[in-house]
Image (cartoon, rainbow, N blue to C red):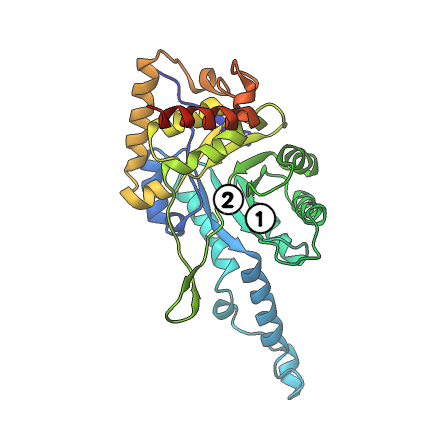
Amino acid sequence: MVDLSTTYLGLPLKNPLVAAASPLSKKESTVRRLEDAGASAVVMYSLFEEQITHESLALDYYLSRGTESYAEAMTYFPDMEKYNVGPEEYLNLIQKLKKAVDIPIIASLNGISTGGWVEYARKMEQAGADALELNIYYLPTDTNLTGQELEQTYVNLVSDIRRQIHIPLAVKLSPYFTALPNFARRLVQAGANGLVLFNRFFQPDLDIEMLEVVPRLELSTSSELRLPLRWVAILYKRVEADLALTGGVHTPEDAIKSIMAGANVVQIASELLSNGINRMSELLVGMRQWMETFEYESVAQMMGSMSQQAVAEPAAFERANYMKALTSYDNRLYI
């Protein structure tokens, strides 16, 4: 029987299929179902920097309001149950999930600036999180902000988070960096144990009748796999960090490709949201069948077997592949 086990962020996992951050992690019952369906770990939905900052400002307001009105008010504290509506609920959910399931629970923190809010990374660890995924979701619009300055902001944040926690730290990135391999190495040097490729920026749309900018959330498709697949293959063994591929994994073949490129795990959300949690078990069955058909004994045997360093034509991942693709399409025009 094939061995699907792998390791990610130092965590032993029964297989490479991880439930990515999504609304599916908001309920204890749903996380139990993910475990039953075969998920080897769950990344929780993100706690945003803005939520933590908002709670802090609200708490300051309620603690200071009316304190000068009369003597007794100097010792007044609000009912904390009324004001801990965001971050504290998140920490409580971590504790509940750790008691409810046996698979690792990976907390997710979303932010960009350094500051007091990063202390919540330590609180997540204290709540029982097995690891932390730092989701740095930032779209630079300031024309005075240079790429070097933006990258250094990311590195500083990773360094600040690393100082707060002892559990493994993964950084979820976007693909929009000038020299991604160098930047990835700097993040690892700053304390990242893993890299998650890639974040998907939500693209707004325009309502030309109402003259409004409207959000449009579209789930991924298998066609999106090629971008993270390429970079996982390039970064494999070039950075001393585990790699997670996310975005475009919808079939057993998608997962197999990701592992062959060099991913320790694949993170899945859109496929589960589209076709149900039980799709996880179907993907695992499909992976086993494929591996048995092609006589692979384990995930470890496959991992990185088609990375840039392993393939016969490494240039296929670079500019030469663009030339070949254009040439092959030209040939079709003359058929």
Is the residue under label 1 in contact with that under label 2 (CB below 8 Å)?
yes
**Residue at the location (47% across, 54% down)?**
92
| Label 2: which secondary element | loop
Mark 2 / mark 1, whichever is N-terminal: 1
Q: Is residue 279 left or right of residue 148?
A: left
Count of numbered badges drawn on the protein: 2
**Residue at the location (33% across, 40% down)?**
271
Inspect the image, locate mark 2, and give the three-letter code of the amino acid beneath it.
Answer: Asn
Inspect the image, locate mark 1, and give the three-letter code of the amino acid beneath it.
Answer: Ile
Label 1 crowd bin: few (<14), some (14–19), many (20+), radius 10 Å: many
Is residue 15 something that shows in the picture?
no
Q: Which residue is labeled 1 in the image?
A: 136
Q: CA distance from mark 2 to mark 1?
A: 8 Å
Above or below, comparing residue 139 to residue 132 in the picture: below
Q: Which residue is labeled 2 in the image?
A: 199
| Label 1: which secondary element | loop
Which is nearer the eye, 214 or 115?
214
Rendered-image quadrant of the N terminus = top left
Residue 234 in percent (x, y) is at: 57, 26
**Residue at the location (52% across, 22% down)?**
316
Residue 72 in percent (x, y) is at: 63, 84
Rendered-image quadrant of the C terminus = top left
Which is nearer the eye, 298 or 248?
248
**Residue at the location (49% across, 17% down)?**
305
